[in-house]
Image (cartoon, grey):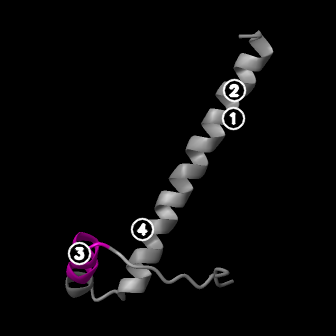
Amino acid sequence: MAADLKDFRGKVTIETHCALEAENRVSGEDKSVIARRVLHEWALKRLEIAKVQLRLFAARERQGT
């Protein structure tokens, strides 16, 4: 099953543009695919951080602190 993709268009810094271009030239992978992968990895990390934060908060609530 293919991932459900949402359209996103945005501007990036020159540093980001150069990084995407370099990655594209080395790997041959489309820049939009590279950007999607990097953003997806970031989003998964943020979700993990949020889960830990919620567990920490719940533990403190149970302790009454």
- Where does label 2 land, which residue? 57
> Mark 2 or mark 4: which comes first in sequence?
4
Residue 54, numbered circle = 1
Q: Residue at x 28, y 78 (%)?
A: 20
Tag 1: amino acid: Leu
Horizontal arrangement in the rendering, residue 54 relative to residue 40 (left or right) = right
Say whether marks 1 and 2 touch (CB < 8 Å): yes
Pick the residue in front: 64 or 47.
64
Q: Secondary structure at mark 1?
A: helix
> Mark 3 or mark 4: which comes first in sequence?
3
- Where does label 3 land, which residue? 14
> Mark 1 or mark 3: which comes first in sequence?
3
> Mark 4 or mark 1: which comes first in sequence?
4
> Mark 2 or mark 3: which comes first in sequence?
3
Say whether marks 3 and 4 touch (CB < 8 Å): no
Q: Is residue 31 above or below residue 12?
A: below
Residue 38, numbered circle = 4
Task: Tell me the CA gap for discs 2 and 4.
Answer: 29 Å
- Give the crowd class for mark 2: few <14, some 14-19, many >=20 residues within 10 Å: few
Q: Write down the region rendered in magenta.
A: 13-23
Q: Residue at x 45, y 72 (%)?
A: 37
Main secondary-structure element of the magenta-colored stretch:
helix
Which mark is nearer the camera, 1 or 3? Answer: 3
Q: Secondary structure at mark 3?
A: helix
